[in-house]
Amino acid sequence: MIELRPFATLGGENHGWLNARHHFSFAGYHDPARMNWGNLRVWNDDVIAPRSGFPPHPHRDMEIITYVRTGAITHRDSLGNEGRTGAGDVQVMSAGTGITHAEMNQEDVPTTLFQIWILPTRGGEKPGWGARPFPKGERSGRFVTLASGFADDDEALPIRTDARVVAATLKAGETADYALGKARRAYLVPATGAVEIEGVRVGARDGAAISDLDTLRVTAIEDSEVVFVDAA
C-alpha cells in the first residue's frame, strides 16, 4: 500500500544555479520503475539560486503546479501573465495547446519549490495560468485542496485533469484524514518535518507512493508541512 522513496534515493543533478531532485524519471534521470504514479508524471524538488531561474521555454498538454516552499518564484508567459508566488502559495499553468514561460528567482535568497506535472484528461483547450495564496493557518490541522480538476472544489485553483493537489500543516502528534478511496492513488511528500502513514515513517522531502487505502491517515511525528497529489 505504501512505497517509501527516501530523498537520498532520488535521481537528479546539481547544475549550480539549479539543484534538482526527481521523484520520477525526468531529464537525464531514467528509472523504468519510476515513470509515473497514475496520471502524476513529474514531482521535482528544486533549489534555485538567487537571481537565476528557468529562461523562456515551451510546454503543451500538461498541468504544471508549482508549490513554493521558501523564497519566491516570478512567472512570465507568452499570454502576458506575470506574477510572483511566495512561500506556501501555489501557481498553476495549464499548458493546453501551447505556451512559453519563464520561472525566475528574483530574490536575494535561494528559492525552494516542488514542481508537479499531471497529465491532462481534457485536451485541445487554450493555455492558462493562475496563482493564489494559501495561508498556512487555513490548513492548520487539516487538509485543504490547493488545485483540483473537480467542479465542487470551487476555492481551489482549477486544473484540467482527474486529480487534486492537497496540503496540510500539522503540529507534532496531530492527525489528519483524507477520503482517498481504494481506486485512487496518492503521492505524498513532507516539505518539512516527518509523518507516519500506516506505520511507515516519511521524512522531509521523502516520497510515499500510496494505493489501496480508503482513508489516508497522516500523523505528524514532528511539526510538518505535507503536500500530496490525489491521482487517478
Image (cartoon, grey):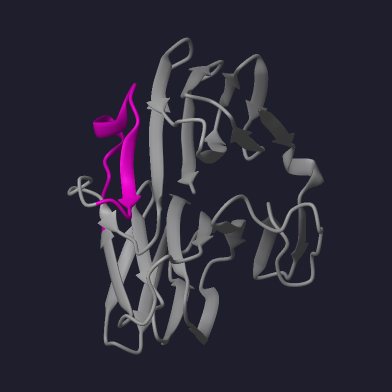
- Residue lying farthest top? 173
Is residue 81 placed above or below 160 in the rendered structure?
Answer: below
Residue occupying the point 59% across, 19% down: 196
Residue occupying the point 25% across, 50% down: 156
Residue 67 part of the magenta-drawn span: no
Q: Position of residue 70 (x, y in %)?
A: 46, 49
Q: Position of residue 161 (x, y in %)?
A: 39, 60
Q: Position of residue 173 (x, y in %)?
A: 47, 10
Q: Quadrant of residue 141?
A: top left
Residue 145 part of the magenta-drawn span: yes
Q: Would you say 28 lies left or right of 217 here? A: right
Query: So how many labels did they put on this image?
Result: 0
Q: Give the range drawn in magenta.
A: 132-150
Q: In which quarter of the image is residue 31?
A: bottom right
Residue occupying the point 44% across, 59% down: 66
Pick the front one: 39 or 10: 39
- For the N terminus, the quadrant is top right
